[in-house]
Amino acid sequence: MHEELNNFTRNEVWTLEAKPEGPRVIGTKWVFRNKQDGEGNIVRNKAILVAKGYSQVEGIDFGETFAPVARLEAIQFLLAYATHHEKGCLKQAS
């Protein structure tokens, strides 16, 4: 757990703040996992701090949700577009 908290601090992912007066604070919990190698031997114990999102109430804690999902066709189009323009840049550089 200390290693995970030190990683948060080192990577500047969070800052500790005082509890606000108005809105509810979403709780957190620790999830512990044992990482194993191919033979089933425990290689590393891992601790992850996760938010208790299930405790939120729609209309009070949030208004709407958004899940970024890309369709396969959109990804194919963007890759084709980038490839086409990359070839044009290479011809101009020659």
Image: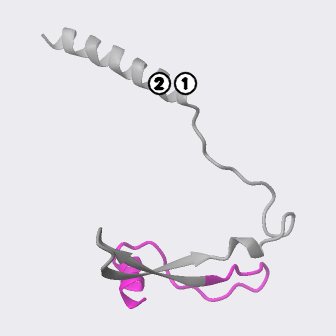
The image shows residue 45, relative to residue 72, as above or below, that is: below
Q: Name the spot of residue 72 as percent of width and height, x first.
A: 54, 30
Q: Which residue is mark 1?
A: 73
Amino acid at dot 2: Gln
The reply to whether the C-beta atoms of the residues labelled 1 and 2 are less than 8 Å apart is: yes
Residue 61, given in percent of the width and then of the height, sits at 79, 69
Give the amino acid type for the residue marked by disc 1 in the picture.
Glu
In this view, the residue in front, 76 or 87, is 76
Magenta span: chief secondary structure:
loop
Q: Secondary structure at mark 1?
A: helix
Q: Specify whether 70 is left or right of 62.
A: left
The residue at 43%/88% (across/down) is 1
Q: Is residue 40 above or below residue 91?
A: below
Q: Quadrant of the C terminus?
A: top left
Magenta highlight range: 1-28
The picture quadrant where one finds residue 33 is bottom left
Q: Which of these two is toward me, 47 or 24?
A: 47
26 on left or right of 61: left
Graded by Cα atoms within 10 Å as few (under 14), some (14 to 19) or many (20 or more), the crowding at tag 2 reads few
Q: State the image quarter where residue 47 is shown.
A: bottom left
Choose between 92 and 4: the one closer to the eye.
4
User: Which residue in the rendered view is the most extreme toward the front?
Assistant: 39
> Image point 76% across, 86% down: which residue?
21
Quote the CA–CA distance across marks 1 and 2. 5 Å
Q: Which mark is residue 37?
A: none
Where residue 76 is drawn, which disc sits there? 2
The structure residue drawn at horizontal position 52% and vertical position 85%, both measured from the top left corner, is 16
Asked if residue 52 is among those painted magenta in the image, a careful observer would answer no
Residue 42: x, y in percent?
A: 32, 81
* Secondary structure of the residue carrying numbered label 2: helix
Q: Position of residue 2 (x, y in %)?
A: 39, 90
Task: Tell me if 65 is positioned left or right of 88 in this view.
Answer: right
